[in-house]
Image (cartoon, rainbow, N blue to C red):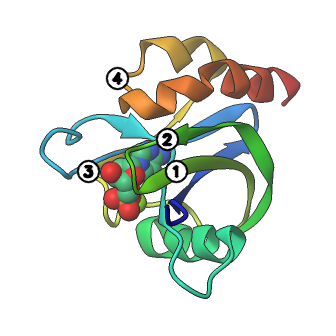
Amino acid sequence: MTERREVAAAALTQNGRLLIAQRTYPPELAGLWELPGGKVDEGETPETALSRELEEELGILCSVGSRLGSEVLLDHRYVLRAYRVVLLDGCPAAHEHSAIRWIELDELDAIDWVAHDREWLPDLAELLREE
Ligand code: 9L3
Ligand code: MG
């Protein structure tokens, strides 16, 4: 069996809030909220891939830190992993999403999440509690 390709997602926090983004595609995920990110291309590390994705998707410069929570199997080809991320420069804007939001701890549960990302809610709650 060939190894699963990674999709890296950003747990970007600032001032006790978490950045979330609303997907526009595929149709079954459109309108749902996620931790922004994308596929790790060949020759990239998860860190360089996630930095690139955040620049493309949100126009920001970030530092990618340690893993958050457990890995989530998307299907037979992909595995999803979250990373703690710190904003270095820029102000996030929705270049590829329909909207972005900064949310607080008590809003986490009520968000209409992409189902796979729900797996990280306990970890995201802990992260926001530490902030
Ligand atoms: N995905 C799920 N949760 C996330 C991210 C960033 C991605 N937090 C899923 C949606 C797509 C696949 O991974 O099926 C690839 O993501 P993208 O490259 O379309 O963002
Ligand atoms: Mg993406």
Does the beta carbon of the residue at mark 4 sit less than 8 Å from ligand 1? no
Query: Is 69 above or below relative to 54?
Result: above
Which mark identifies residue 73?
A: 2
The residue wearing badge 4 is 112
Which amino acid is tagged 1? Val
Q: Residue furthest right?
A: 130
Q: Nearer the viewer, mark 1 or mark 3?
A: 1
- Which residue type does callout 3 highlight? Ser
Q: Residue 6: x and y, percent?
A: 54, 61
Q: Give the distance between the C-alpha atoms of the residues marked 2 and 1, in whole angstroms.
A: 5 Å
Please tell me which of labels 3 and 2 falls first in the chain. Answer: 2
Circle 2 crowding by C-alpha within 10 Å: few under 14, some 14–19, many from 20: some
List the residue tagged with mark 1: 79
Quadrant of the drawing holding the C terminus: top right
Q: Local crowd at mark 3 within 10 Å, few (<14), some, or many (≥20)?
A: some
> What is the secondary structure assignment of the residue under circle 2?
strand
Distance from Cα at disc 4 to Cα at disc 3 = 14 Å
Q: Residue at x 38, y 27 (%)?
A: 115
* Disc 2/disc 4 C-alpha distance (Å): 20 Å
Residue type marked 4 = Asp
- Left or right, 99 with respect to 71, comes to left
For disc 3, the marked residue is 98
* x, y percent for residue 92: 52, 60
Q: Is residue 47 above or below residue 79?
A: below
- Residue at figure coordinates x 62%, y 37% from the top left: 18
Of labels 4 and 1, the one closer to you: 1
